[in-house]
Amino acid sequence: MKLGMGAKIIGLLISGLTLVASAQPALADQPVSGISSTAYNEGLDKAAAFYNPLAVSNVKLTLPDASFNELNNNPGTVVYQHAAVTITTADGVVTSFADIGVRIKGQATRTNLYGKAPLKLKFDQFVPGQKFMGLTRMTLNSMVQDPSYVHEDMTYRIYRAMGVIAPRTTYSWVTLNGQDFGLYMNIESVDSQMLKRWTTPKHLYSSNCYGADLTPWQSGCYDTNYGDADRTDLNAAVAVSNLDGADWWTAVNKVANMTEVINLMATDIFTSNWDGYTDVVQNNYFIVFDNNSKLSLIPWGEDGTFPMDPSAQLDWLGQGPAFRNWGNSRSVMLRKCVAYDPCKALLIQAEVAAKNTVSRLDMVTEKNQITAVINDAYVAHENRPTFVYLPGVISWQNWLDTFFDQRTTSLTSFLLTQPPVAAAVAVAGVPRVGQILNATASTYDYSATSAFQWLRDGQAITGAQASTYQLGATDLNHSISVRLSQTKPGFTSAETTSNASVISPAVAAPAAAISGDAVVNGLLSATPITAGDTQVSYQWLRAGRAIAGATATTYSPTVVDFQKAITVRTTVLQTGFKTAISTSNSKTIQAGTMTAPVITINGSGVMAQTLSATGTIAAGTKVSWQWLRDNTAIQGATRVNYSIKADDVTHKLALRATFIRTGFNPVTTLTDQIAVVAANQTKVPAVSISGLTKVGRTLSGIASGWDSGSKQSYQWLRDGVAITGETARTHKLVAADIGATLVFAVTSKKPGFVDASAQSAASAQVTN
C-alpha cells in the first residue's frame, strides 16, 4: 500500500490510535508458553517446531542509541540498523546474537518505534552465515490492524492446506531496550529458504503499490526480491493479459501454475481477503517464478480477512461494488477466469474445496486453542499503542465461528444460482447375470440433487433408480449403463451417462467346499455363499450323517467330532441353472487347543502345614499333579494335597498340573512359587531344679513333655554364665558354686522347626 492511502485505512481500522511519548516498562519475567501440541507443526526443517501458533517465544531486542534514533526518526528507511537480540523459545532454549540487522516494515502499519512498529530482523546482515534455527530472517507483524490477534495465522493455514505457497506463523512477545512492545505475529519471511520448501525459485517479486497486477500498465509495481534483473518471465506473464477466452486459457497455463493461482483466488474469496491479490486492491502478495518459468502467487499481510462488515465479504465471482468503493476492477486473473467457463468452473470447485478445507482443519477448534494460550497471558498485557480491551478482542475471535457458517451459507446460495454441473459417474461390479452393479457420482456441487436411472440398450429400466442394480436374466447380452442427473430449481438438469457394459451369462456357483481350522472348537466355513440371485442352503455332516441343527454357513467342531470326518452338503438355487446339490471333501477333526484352567495353591508355606490346589476344571478333564521344590520334582508328591516336610524349609514349592481331555492337546500349567519357613514347636514345658544347694550335693534338672520327635540339650549356668562341660541333667556342687545361684537351661531341636528354649528359676545360693 502507498503510505498516503494507508494512513486513511489505519484511521478506520484502529480507532483511537495515538503515539505515546514513552514506552511502558517491560512486564516482569513475561512468560513463554510451553509447546502444548505439535499438531500444527509443518515441515521437516529446523524451524518447523518454532512455527507453532500454540507456542509463544520471547524476542528481546537491544538497540544502541544510533540505531534507535535512526529508526524512530526515519521509520521509512529500508536500511537495516545494528542491534542485539536474545530469543527464548517456548521450550526454554535461549539464543543470543550480539549483532543483527533490524528495520521497520509495513506500509499502512508503518510507524515509529513508539507506535508498536512492525519489524524485520536479518540475522546475517552484519555477520555472514549467522542463522537462528536455520533462518536468516524473521518478520514481526504488530497486528495493530487485526483486532482478533488470530486472523493471520488462520488464513495462512488455510492457504497452505489448499496447496498455496504461504508462510508459517507463531507468536512472540517483543521487548525493545527493556520496554514491552507487546505480542507480535512472527511470520516466516518469504525468501529463498522458505521458497525452496515449496518450489525451485528462479525469481521472486513483491508488490509495492496498490493495483499491482499482471497488466502492462501495472507491471511496474513489482520489485525484485530474489533472482537477477532479467524480467523476461514477468513480461511474458504480463503479455498474456492481452488475450481472452480460450486463447488466454491456453497461454496462461504456459506461464502460470494455474491450479495454485485458482486455489489462491478461491481462498481469497472464501476468507474475504479484500486486501489481497484477487479483489480490487491487488495488494499484499508476492510472485515467484520456478525453474520452468511458471509463476505462483504468494499471499502476504492477511490481517484484512474474515471481516464483520457484510460489504467486505467478497462475491464468489468478483461481481458487485467493491469494499469502501475502492474502484471496481478485480485482478486480471480473476476477470479473465470468470469470463471463461472452464476456468470459472475450476474456480467455483476450488471455493467449495476451501469450505471443505476449513471444515477438515477444524479452524474453530484451532482458534480456541490459540486464544486459550494468548489471551490472558499476553493480549491482556498489551498497552501499545493504546489500551487493548480484551472483551472486544474475544468478540472478534468468536466472530470467526459465525463467519465460517455465514460463508458456507453464502456459498450454498451462490451455487444454487449456477446451472448444475454434469457429474462424473462410475460403475463398479461384474457385468454378469446375478451380480450387482454399483454407481457412484463425483461432483463438487453439493447444492445439486443427484438422481440415477439405469438403462438397458439406452432405454430406461422401469423401477431402476437406485445407485445399485441387480442384473437379471432379462439383461443377458444387453448393454447396461446408468444415467446421472444433477438438478437444481429453475435450471435444466445436467446429465452424464456411464460407459455401457454387455452383460454375460451367469457362471454356475462352485461345488461345496470347506475352509478353516479342522480342530475341536475351531471354525469351519462353507462355500459358495448366498449372493445376488444365488441362494445357498447348508447341511453339515459327521461321518456322512447329518448333524442336528448344523445348517449355517459355519460350523464349530465339538469333542464328538474328534477324529471323525466332517463334510458339508450345499443346495444351490441360482437363476438360469438347475438346483445343484454337492458335498464337499471331508476334513478329519484333530485335537483342539484347550484353555488351561487357572490353578492356585491354598495354604501357608509353614512346616507341617498341608497345601492344596484349587481351580475350576471342566468335566471330563483328567489332571496329573506334581509338586516341585525349587523347580525340581519331589519324588512321590503327585497328589492334589501336599504336607510340607523338613526338607522343604528355606526352599520354594510350586505345583505343576497337566490337563488331559479327549479331543484336546494336553496342556500344562505351573503355579506361582511359595516360600517355606520353619514352624514353631508347640510344647515348651516348665523347667525346674531339685536338690540341696550345698557343696558336695547334686542338683537335678527337671523337664518333660517336649514335642514328639524333638531332641533336648542341657546347660547349667552359674550366675547366668554357662559352666563349661556341665551339659548333663545333673550338676554336682563344687567350691566354685559357693555364694552363686544356678539355673538349668534346656534347648529343644526338631527338624523343620524353630529351636525352643526354656530355663528354670534360679536356685538358692550355694553354701559350704
Image: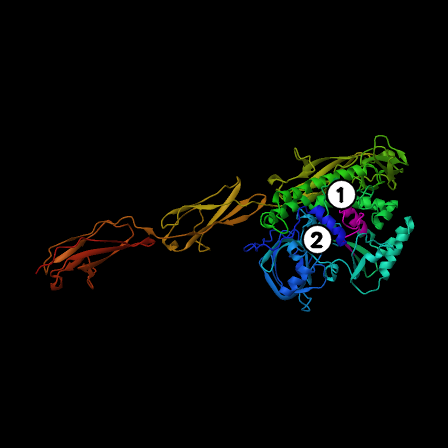
* Along the viewing direction, whichever of 681 and 187 lies nearer the viewer: 187
Could one spot residue 325 in this view of the protein? yes
Q: Position of residue 738 (x, y in %)?
A: 11, 61
Measured Cα–Cα span from mark 1 to mark 2: 20 Å
Q: Earlier in the sequence, mark 1 or mark 2?
A: 2
Crowding at dot 1, Cα within 10 Å, few <14 / some 14-19 / many 20+, comes out as some
**In the rendered view, would you say 176 is above or below 351?**
below
Classify the position of the C terminus by image quarter.
Answer: bottom left
Q: Is residue 692 left or right of residue 248?
A: left
Give x and y (percent) for residue 326. Answer: 80, 46
Q: Quadrant of residue 228?
A: bottom right
Q: What kind of residue is marked 1?
A: Ala
Question: Of the residues shown, which amino acid type is indicated by label 2?
Answer: Thr
Decide which of 702, 46 is in the foreground and name it. 46
* Residue interval drawn in magenta: 261-286
Q: Nearer the viewer, residue 580 or 503?
A: 503
Q: Which residue is label 1 attached to? A: 312
**Where is residue 408 shown, x and y percent of the image?**
74, 40
Sort mark 2 into few (<14), some (14-19) or many (20+) by Cα contacts within 10 Å.
many
Q: Which mark is residue 85?
A: none
Residue occupied by mark 2: 109
Query: For this view, does 310 lie left or right of residue 613?
Result: right
Q: Position of residue 575 (x, y in %)?
A: 82, 34
> Does residue 275 show up magenta in the picture?
yes
Q: Nearer the viewer, residue 531 or 385?
A: 385
Q: Residue furthest front?
A: 21
